[in-house]
Image (spheres, rainbow, N blue to C red):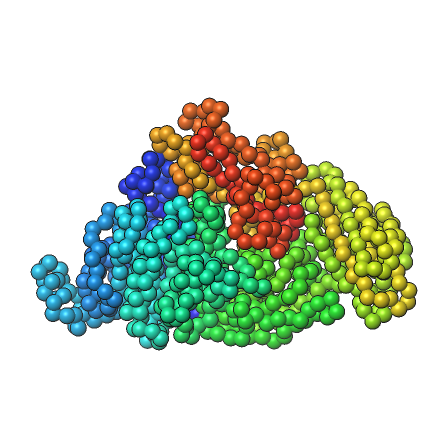
Amino acid sequence: MGLRVLSWNVQMRSWAMQVGASPGYTIPPIDTGEERARIIAKKLIASPWDDDIVGVCEVFDEDCREILSDELKTRFPHQIVKCDYATMTVREPSGESTVQLLLAWDLIGLPGAVTNSYRLEDSGLMLFSRFPFARVSTSTVSEGVRQLMILAGLPIPLDIPRVSFYPYTDTAGHDGDACKGVAYAGVRQWSTAPVTHTFVTHTQADTNVVEENRTAREEQLRKAAAFVDVCAGGAPFGEEVIVMGDLNVCGEPGQVASRTGEWRHYFGSPGHRLTDDLVDLFGAFQCQGGTDLRDPGHTATVRYDPMEQRLDYMIGSRTSVLAAQHIWIDYDLAQVPSDAPDDVSYLSDHRPLRADFAVPRVHSTPTSALILPVDAANPDAADPQQWIWEGQVAWYLLKEAGTYDIAVDSNPDRPVRYAVYLDTDLSRPRQQYRQERHPDYGDKFVLNGAPILIKVYPRDRHGEQDFSIRVHRHTGAGPDDMIHLDYGRDLAERFPSSGQVVCLNHPVTGWDDTDSKWFRLDAPRLDLGEVSGTVSVSGSGLPFRVRIARSDGAGGWRLEADESAGRDPVSVPVTMRPNDIFLVQVARQDGLTPRDFTATLRADIDLSILLGGPPKPPVPGAPDDPGGNPRLVCVTETSGWGADDIDLVVNVDGRRLLHADNDSIGDFDQDDIRDLGQYLDPVVPYREGVEFVVKEIDDIGRDDIGRKSLPPYADLLTSPFFDLAPGAQPAPDGRIRGRLKIPVDDGLYGVDVTVVRWDERL
């Protein structure tokens, strides 16, 4: 019994809601809502993840609601279409029906009195299920409710679907215009299966400061937890419970969460139902921080600090019999497709969150991954003849960064796939290096951070699959085992100890390379002409020698530098042309019984890389690669009537790269966000800077044009115009994430970007 669940705030506001929240009248959250609804429905149907249950928030626009319901009815025939203060609209294969909440509350339960009244908007919640709703007989309806139904002229059916809705009464600001609450559906995977109790909610948002509306949100979550308890039969729960949605709580990793923060108050405090009975499957289970599993899981971009937050949640019960195999952000689903209408520049200000559940097996979650004991002294490890069935996965963990060959073998009639992650990002798989593969050892990966996780999963989640996995870490012992150098990172490599040599002389070079470690340095595969670089090497007290050779393209090497350094550090300039491959050899020169030695290498080039959108076209068979997730954010809207009519120009080293006019990128109100990945190449190299020019074109004057340049990588951490994203910067893999601040008149815009010195796609 497996289960795949998706939660997404799709930001489909109504005209009334948007006009009430801002002075703008024509902005993309409403102008493009119907187009985005069709795109999202199409992408959900085409998704390879074969979802079972989808919960969405913020569908306030009636046309968008109708489009989602109609487009998804074949794939998800059982739907909660609408939740309001007195009724729910439910769609099933037999047709659409209205469920009176008086009846649902009486038959399923209610944790307390409901004092909510009419609101301008409904809850914005929808739920889509492949599985049918359980049924509840109305034979036990209380006499008081029966009389109320008769008085109101409402018929009482023989049974109703097991659905309910509990509206919140504590709200702040414009959130009070909506009938926010928590929706419930009990579904059965088959007729005699136990009920899976599924909840979706959207709680009070903050506006200007994190936790500013904590008081209202705390009361909402208290009521939501009590509602879960009533609907699911009381804790400890005997059946599966899944709660999802946009909680608007700034999520933290459990091991390092603030002692006074809102997240810990709910999810890390014994005595609270969200801690004792339920569990945040991301922050309190999968990625708790500390030294391992440090993925922050940011699902939303906001205008205030911290600029990226984990606001969307997947919550399970403490007594679940299923393994939460993987919780991740589906960046590919959130990506605007290439065939989208020109005026659709994003799908939502939130990113979708997925969860994959299955019957447990050993090593079926990232936290229980099997450690493959691979290091420089023991470079090979394997786990042969493993079995998975009905959607199970197997996780493996490598403790050291390095160059790896990975092979996963399976029965071609029952194939499996695999994906490789760094522990700092369990949503974006690392890419196979230049599609290179060793015939014996497998696919090559250059992994510049650790821990490293490998997920083996079935191509078809039904039935059973057998597989074996083999991993080889490159040791630099020869031309087939070279260790890759990435740019801008120190790489320390130990030579064999106890008098052993790395290797004997190899005939492919024209010199004696006994006891040498082989390193490979690749020029960027970009049409940039010559690129200047430097290779620096230092040792740990023994004499050493450095040779640098350029590949001749036919298996041989042309020696270009030969430095006998003794014990002193060496720095060698290198001129690279597109697609050049260099051999960097470090030879230990300590006689026939050499002592312990460590060489530290570093390669630098005069390039910085702005990560743009996904590959165009995608690499066949490769995992999803969403790129650097660049976004334009309206932090503070300019004054004046109506929304900001924005026009964007991007210049790289003084040359225009792109122009996104207002018809394409749209108007902006405060908090609005647009994705820029569809406009940018996967990698944007630059030497001097990337200039972003934001124009407010209503009435262009000198003050209506804002321009700021993204400085080179080395200057980002100290730039006064660049705010760093939360978390360690640079990240363990060398990425720097942050927001370039661009004043426009009396407003402020931000460009959220990821900058690196090296990327495996180069």
In the image, is 72 to the left or to the right of 758?
left
Q: Quadrant of the N terminus?
A: bottom left
Whole-percent x, y for residue 141 in the image: 16, 70
Give the residue displayed 31% in from the left and 73% down from the top.
Answer: 234
Name the image quarter holding residue 416: bottom right
Give the residue displayed 47% in from the left and 65% down from the top.
Answer: 284
Whole-percent x, y for residue 81 in the image: 29, 55
Name the image quarter holding residue 79: bottom left
Whole-percent x, y for residue 339 in the image: 47, 43
Residue 494 in view: yes
Whole-percent x, y for residue 205 in the image: 36, 50
Closer to the camera in the image, 579 or 731: 731
Residue 345 in view: no
Give the residue displayed 26% in from the left and 52% down from the top.
Answer: 179
Count the numbered circles shown: 0
**On screen, 240 above or below 660?**
below
Give the residue displayed 17% in from the left and 65% down from the top.
Answer: 157
**On screen, 377 above or below 650?**
below
**On screen, 386 above or below 720?**
below
Question: Which residue is situated farthest in the front direction here?
Answer: 260
**On screen, 396 above or below 750?**
below
In the image, is 186 to the left or to the right of 752?
left
